Amino acid sequence: MQEADSVAAQDTLPEPFFPVFPDPASEKPGVAQSWEMLDLLATGALSFADLLEFTPFLDPLRAGVLEGPQAAIFAGRGGGSFRYTLDGYDVVPLTNAALDLHLISLVELQRLALIREPGGYRGYSQTYRNQRREPYSRIEAGTGDRQTQILRALLSSRVGRARAGFGYDQIDTKGFSGLGNSQRAVVWANLAYPLPLGVWGQLEWRNTIADRDSFPSPERTDWILRLRRDFGDGWHADIVAGRASESDSVGDTPREFTASQVALRAARTSRVWRAQLTLRAWDGDGVPIFEPEASLELRAGPASLYAGGRYEKWDDLDLASGYAALEVQLPLNIRALAEIEEGDRGLFGQAVRPSYEFSRWTAGGEIGVWSWTVGARGGRWRTKPSLALGPPADSAVSLPGGTVGVVEAWARGPVARLFGGRLDLGGWYRSREAGDFYYWPQDSWRVDGLYHVLAVRDQFELWITGMGGIRGVTRVPDPELGAGFVTTRQQYWFRAEAVVRIKDFFFFYNYEYFDSDAGPQDIPGRLLPRARIHYGVKWEFWN
């Protein structure tokens, strides 16, 4: 019996698997938000835009719903202010300056971190890594209004010494406000294999197709090769190379785009300091020639310093930007915060590559009182666009420039324990000067609450989330004249989400309400749907 127990124990021991490359030096204050796989399972977010839009303190403006391209613009930063890196491979938009978040799959992610960087935010993701011998699978299915259908699948298994993964993510909808049908499907597969000298190799293929009635219907294919090794004592190195090809059409004119990249990365992590260096070279349409970037974090007693910088070399211009933040832990559970960023930001995907200069600083602090966190900060933001014209969200017309003041305040903490669970509440407020900016909500606030229960020997789990608020008046391009701007009224919104886990099943229900009848509330100036409802199930299983 003892021998049988020993064999059973060996079957559950972790297997060697494709190693994780660390995020940039991104412990506080660099990380804005992060999600582990359980966090992604415990939400009914259908798209990447959903995930960002309803995350407290980010406050992005959203373009589009399921019918067409979706983007997130962080106020005052323009459409190119969000970038996405898939385990070392930069997913850049080849046809537009703003990344279409609807074309990014969520099903295969094991971890996602949103990190502050010069000029905006970047999402760093890691695909699922099976650390057990048994195959892992997951099926997700859902439906909702506008005859929306969701079908997702994930499979990860061992094949000899190799690790193989396969994923499928499809969202179909019948459309809203005459926009027509939209069908989007993402298929991906990867194979990781241990090579000599402790090196792991991984080959990944991804294909994305969007079939839309009222918008361009792009098809994109990415091939990605990763060679990675951990050297011990916190040292990491890898090479990431890939090629993207994309096609779509504007009217009856087909368009083809291609871009290749190769990145050499090195990282060091320790309890005192973390550093990362990336040297990335490009060749293709709408991409720079060379793009090195570096990040560093130092911890000395109660202080933590984070700094990052990036340089971009294009055919016709050079761009450089930097970001630094300081966090100091003071007596009485007080944390002081300060950050500053300055530089130029270029936009991907443009034949004429616009850029804008920016400088921003904020300072403040937060205090912990009775398990609550209360904080505030203020500062000034300045933007000076170039004369080159980009897409509406980034053009010199949309970002005429100026300097404005910003004040933010927040509070969050537990309220009570009810029926074996815990109720947390939070609130957030932001006041901005008007300035000469589009997409710049003023005097916005939100409140949110989370009720969480874990019971029945961890076999039952319940998350109930509610959030709502007011988004202030916003300038948007005039949807009828195509020039000038109109000012929206305040927008009231509410979102409720319930997720129940019973053993390996997750049942989710989402309800969203936008008070959007009185005027254009979306970035392109279109009306948002007044309400959205989606629900479904996620099923995990081993073997």
Image: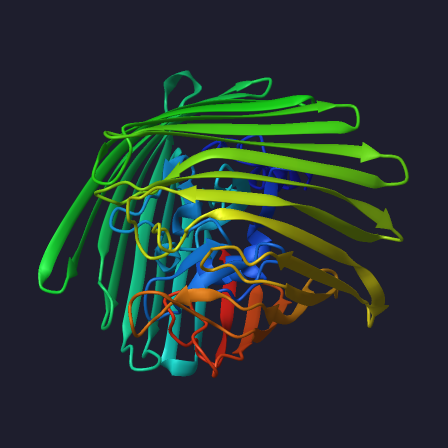
Residue 238 at x, y percent in the picture: 41, 24
Task: From this view, report whether residue 74 is shown above or below residue 383.
Answer: below
**The N terminus is located in which quarter?**
top right
From the viewer's perspective, tell me whether residue 456 is left or right of residue 494.
Answer: right
Q: What is the total number of numbered labels drawn onto the structure image?
A: 0
Quarter of the image where one finds residue 386: top left
What kind of colouring is applied to the model shown? rainbow
Q: Is residue 538 visible?
A: yes
Q: Residue at x 66, y 65 (%)?
A: 445
Task: From this view, report whether residue 302 is shown above or below residue 334.
Answer: above
Residue 506 at x, y percent in the picture: 57, 67
Q: Nearer the viewer, residue 83 or 207?
A: 83
Residue 122 at x, y percent in the picture: 48, 43
Q: Nearer the viewer, residue 397 or 171?
A: 397
Quarter of the image where one finds residue 505: bottom right
Q: Is residue 124 visible?
A: no
From the viewer's perspective, tell me whether residue 93 is left or right of residue 337.
Answer: left
Q: Nearer the viewer, residue 46 or 120?
A: 120
Residue 333 at x, y percent in the picture: 86, 41
Task: From this view, report whether residue 453 is shown above or below residue 406.
Answer: below
From the viewer's perspective, tell me whether residue 417 is left or right of residue 108.
Answer: right
Q: Residue at x 32, y 57 (%)?
A: 186
Q: Residue at x 41, y 16 (%)?
A: 197
Task: From this view, report whether residue 441 is shown above or below residue 94.
Answer: below
Quarter of the image where one finds residue 215: bottom left
From the viewer's perspective, tell me whether residue 207 is left or right of residue 126.
Answer: left
